[in-house]
Image (tube, rainbow, N blue to C red):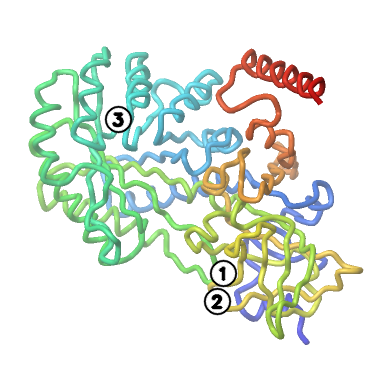
Amino acid sequence: MKTYYDLIDQTFEFPTREFNVENNELMFNNVPLMDIVKEYGTPLKLTYLPKITEHIEHAKLLFKNAMKRYNYKGNYTYCYCTKSSHFRFVLDEVLKNNVHLETSSAYDIQILRELYKSGKINKSTYIICNGYKRPLYTQYISELLNEGFTNCIPVLDNLKEIEAYENSVTADTVNFGIRIATDEEPNFAFYTSRLGIRYSDVNELYRNKIQPNEKFKLKMLHFFINTGIKDSAYYWSELSRFMYKYCELRKMCPDLDSIDIGGGMPIQTSFQFTYDYQAMIDQIVESIQWICNKNNVPVPHIFTEFGSYTVGESGAVIYKVIDQKLQNDKELWYMIDGSFITQLPDSWGLGQKYIMLSVNNWDNPYQKVNLGGLTCDSHDFYNTEAHSADLYLPIFDQDTEDQYIGLFHTGAYQESLGGYGGIQHCLIPAPQHVIVDKDEEGNLRTRLFAPEQNSEVMLKILGYGGAEPGMTELEATEAAEEREEEAELMKEEN
């Protein structure tokens, strides 16, 4: 029987720039994964920070090339979509690259304040404020504007939102964006996105609420569709419709000079991934310019807010196979020391696929397996890859060998969707998180960002450890004293 390496080599173009094998062990961006496993153990999440910078530089180059090719007169601005990963180590790496930020909730603004205090951003940093905004969010945005964050742009998501700024902003100028409610994909449950303002209301909003107010300016139109940026008739149709609306508004609003085409740049989730990034960006830039020229309006500055593309391919999760279970004549389960349903929620919630590879034993023969997680939920499994309905891993003797597996490009959304640091199904703890970076000489270095979640943290969240969610320290102390008194009384009664 051929080896696991032979299987991967024959099935895909392998090795790749990102993955290779040395001494029968997998390397991820030249990071020796087994060295990290030996130092930290499993399960563990891993973030390779240089990948974030690599993707930011790549996107900037794509737009630079396209704008040069078509002699495009507008500028390009890269914004990071913070909801993809709010972690400090991610934002620190992102902001090394002279980029800007997009927010989606009130608490994002508090993160920005911490970044401002530490000198990571300044008052000229673009802050694109998206989302349906409750009062606390509009309050925080207004405070930023009043404090001189001149490039903070609230993107209006409904017709009444602007009223919050009329009453609270004292700054001389407020630059607004308007999110357009695009049509959903033909196979979607709804015709039009719940997000944004419908096309027929945009002109009226400008004329009635923005144009009459001397300190209000409409600077940006915002465009986004759920399918992301892909070469489909649906995408090009919606982008064209959006650009014609931009040209229409530009003729009545000379302040309007920018568009935000959102995020949605795809990441690699399979070795069979084929996406021509440069061709797509070329076509976007060319289409925008062609429609503007046709309508005799200046081309807009282009903003993007890439989230998954920025951070997704920096992430990996490594598990140990802790048992082999043959449940019938042909279904063999490799049980892992973690959970897909809690630690990679997109894998079951959306059917998201990731690159899955063995970390070691590449010279062993292979067999078809299913991967099972620790929870009692029937959905806690991972059993398919894009190239087939089957998943293969090395055969190993669990009495004499250890087997580790890795799922890659998991860096976006999984911690927030999984409720990082909170309570998860079957009380499966959040795994330890290891950061991999390079020093000034280019040498790899690792550090533990957070250990595996322990029982004490969970008990406190659940109210067993003296403190309940929302309690102050004094309230928690008083509650603990009351429980002690009750316990003493019960002892006396018994």
Instruction: Tell whether 136 sits left or right of 206.
Output: right
Compared to residue 414, the image places residue 363 above or below, namely below
- Residue under the point 74% across and 79% down: 366
Please tell me the numbered disc located at residue 271.
1
Give residue 434's position: percent from left, percent from top.
71, 43
Q: Amino acid at mark 2?
A: His
Label 1 – label 2 distance at C-alpha: 9 Å
Q: Marks 3 and 2: in contact by CB < 8 Å?
A: no
Instruction: Tell whether 441 sits left or right of 168.
Output: right
Crowding at dot 1, Cα within 10 Å, few <14 / some 14-19 / many 20+, comes out as some
Q: Marks 2 and 1: in contact by CB < 8 Å?
A: yes
Please tell me the numbered disc located at residue 154.
3
Quarter holding the N terminus?
bottom right
Which badge, 1 or 2, is on the more N-terminal residue? 1
- Residue under the point 26% across and 56% down: 286
Which badge, 3 or 1, is on the more N-terminal residue? 3
Say which quarter of the image contains residue 134. top left
Residue position for label 2:
387
Secondary structure under tag 3 reads: strand
Give residue 343's position: percent from left, percent from top.
62, 51
Secondary structure under tag 1 reads: loop
Secondary structure under tag 2 reads: loop
